[in-house]
Image (spheres, rainbow, N blue to C red):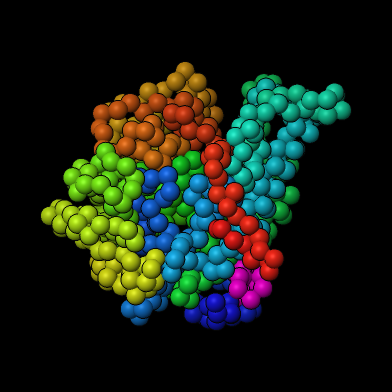
């Protein structure tokens, strides 16, 4: 790794612009961010994927490798990526900083604790929770109804035992007993707020807009009415500043914010994306999980809020994921027929990309044990459909194995930028917005709202929140809400079980199927394989 000051110099940043965290990590100062807000912007490339297997298809690895390949071709490029959550690191997927020769460095530090952003977000969220229960305990003038509080607590760990909880037990000195629970920090509304805020005033405005519950007269109680805004913002004073690190080959990377794409909106912070665009000619960013989740929300939530629009879109595919969606097992062994059957799933996502006005570049992320006949079949089928396609060998070869993809992406990014085209208009009803996403992006034939969801929507309209965009929470493994329903299956029903108001983040959160906002560990979690050596080196991430 090179000293972080050398990486900063590639973006024309000096030590005066940085708050250093040792020799390899830094934050960009608020004054610099304010100055850069008026600089011209570079070209933005969005990397997404088809629906992944449980192990993931290497979207972050491809994003990093693509940037390294573009740098080898002489482009002035930067990365704008999300921070990893400790939940997946100790769960199934493992680290979230890329892999092989396409990693963010220092990868272990980034995967574990980093600069403390996740902890600050959790602290700010839980401070508000403490203030809520404090107001209930002391019967404050807000007259908060404890049975109408829906602000939960958060923890950056997979812990299913905390999904539902009863608090306030042990007598009157310990608060008022009520049911609540925990979400994972990456699904926190405070995380969504941090990632969508334009600056400090916008951050404080959004924190004040958080809806925590209702009083006994049915009026909303917010973060501002609890006088929580200032203290929460103070806890986030450093967390709002984007982090600067580097890739394996020295590409500058602004890594900031980490909302889950299957629950929240799945994109890195607006502040980091805009700062990267102000300091480089090309910026590679990603959106969580498949195009049906993070990428749709990237367009309809992040871009709409921040005034951004990409210049090119990349869809990552793997042979194993296509085989999985073609009826086979998610391995590298099987028949070419399974691959070809799985191509229908890819083509559905291609049509989703086109719905936003883009022709995607297909990136085939090659694994070491992939079969050549499978890769050729993917390439042939894509070319027969008129799709630009390139293999990606970045995991083993770094930027050198990414140049062919980089050439195709550069050609796409340098074409005229497609006009802005959202999936729905904000004046449409919440039901119409959900139906637009469900029918066009998922392929659903009908959206079925539960009795709870209908009551939620009635309250949303009465409070005037019905003009907000929609953030759909559903499984990332399938286009439907059923994780076992893989492949391309049109004509299913999408069940909406509840609709939460995320007034601070600025969207309505529609919960579908059996989605949970606090994941659990598997029977054999990655935590069993992680260790610390006698020399102080973290192993197994």
Q: Position of residue 171 (x, y in %)?
A: 85, 23
Residue for point 33% across, 33% down = 485
Q: Position of residue 162 (x, y in %)?
A: 64, 34
The quadrant the N terminus occupies is bottom right
Give the farthest residue toward the top. Answer: 451
Viewer-side residue, 220 vs 277: 277
Give the farthest residue toward the left. Answer: 384
Q: In the picture, residue 200 is in which quadrant?
A: bottom right
Residue for point 75% across, 32% down = 133
Q: Is residue 24 magenta?
A: yes
Viewer-side residue, 130 vs 385: 385
* Image: magenta residue range: 17-29
Kindly tell me whether residue 466 is visible in this rendering: no
Viewer-side residue, 85 vs 303: 85
Q: Position of residue 390 (x, y in %)?
A: 25, 64
Kindly tell me whether residue 101 is visible in this rendering: yes
Using residue 353 as the reference point, say whether residue 386 is left or right of it. Answer: left
């Amino acid at each position: 790794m090179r000293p972080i000051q050398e990486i900063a110099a590639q973006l024309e940043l000096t030590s005066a612009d940085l708050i250093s965290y040792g020799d390899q990590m830094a934050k960009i100062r608020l004054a610099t961010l304010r100055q850069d807000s008026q600089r011209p912007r570079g070209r933005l490339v969005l990397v997404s994927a088809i629906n992944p297997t449980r192990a993931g298809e290497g979207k972050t690895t491809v994003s990093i490798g693509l940037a390294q390949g573009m740098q080898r071709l002489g482009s002035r490029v930067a990365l704008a990526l999300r921070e990893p959550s400790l939940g997946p690191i100790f769960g199934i997927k493992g680290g979230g900083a890329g892999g092989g020769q396409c990693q963010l460095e220092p990868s272990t530090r980034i995967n574990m604790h980093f600069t403390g952003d996740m902890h600050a977000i959790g602290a700010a969220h839980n401070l508000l929770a403490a203030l809520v229960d404090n107001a209930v305990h002391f019967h404050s003038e807000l007259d908060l109804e404890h049975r109408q509080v829906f602000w939960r607590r958060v923890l950056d760990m997979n812990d299913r035992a905390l999904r539902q909880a009863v608090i306030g037990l042990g007598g009157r000195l310990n608060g008022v007993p009520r049911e609540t629970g925990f979400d994972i920090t990456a699904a926190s509304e405070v995380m969504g707020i941090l990632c969508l805020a334009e600056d400090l005033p916008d951050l404080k405005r959004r924190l004040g807009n958080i809806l925590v519950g209702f009083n006994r007269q049915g009026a909303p109680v917010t973060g501002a009415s609890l006088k929580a805004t200032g203290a929460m913002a103070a806890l986030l004073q450093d967390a709002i500043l984007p982090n600067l690190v580097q890739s394996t080959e020295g590409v500058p990377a602004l890594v900031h914010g980490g909302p889950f794409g299957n629950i929240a909106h799945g994109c890195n912070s607006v502040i980091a994306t805009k700062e990267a665009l102000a300091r480089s000619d090309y910026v590679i960013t990603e959106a969580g999980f498949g195009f049906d989740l993070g990428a749709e929300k990237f367009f309809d939530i992040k871009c709409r809020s921040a005034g951004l629009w990409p210049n090119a879109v990349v869809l990552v595919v793997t042979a194993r994921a296509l085989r999985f969606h073609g009826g086979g097992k998610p391995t590298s062994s099987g028949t070419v027929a399974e691959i070809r059957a799985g191509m229908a799933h890819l083509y559905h996502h291609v049509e989703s990309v086109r719905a936003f006005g883009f022709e995607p570049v297909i990136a085939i992320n090659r694994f070491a044990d992939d079969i050549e006949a499978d890769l050729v079949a993917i390439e042939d089928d894509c070319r027969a459909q008129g799709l630009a396609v390139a293999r990606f060998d970045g995991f083993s070869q770094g930027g050198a194995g990414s140049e062919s993809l980089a050439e195709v992406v550069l050609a796409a990014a340098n074409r005229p930028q497609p006009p802005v085209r959202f999936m729905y208009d904000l004046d449409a009803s919440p039901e119409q917005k959900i139906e637009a996403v469900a029918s066009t992006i998922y392929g659903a034939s009908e959206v079925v709202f539960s009795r709870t969801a209908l009551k939620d929507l009635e309250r949303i309209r009465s409070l005037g929140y019905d003009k907000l965009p929609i953030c759909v929470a559903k499984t990332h493994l399938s286009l439907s809400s059923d994780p076992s329903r893989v492949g391309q299956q049109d004509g299913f029903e999408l069940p909406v079980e509840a609709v939460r108001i995320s007034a601070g983040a600025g969207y309505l959160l529609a919960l579908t199927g059996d989605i949970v906002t606090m994941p659990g560990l598997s029977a054999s979690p990655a935590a069993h394989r992680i260790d610390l050596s006698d020399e102080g080196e973290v192993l197994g991430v």
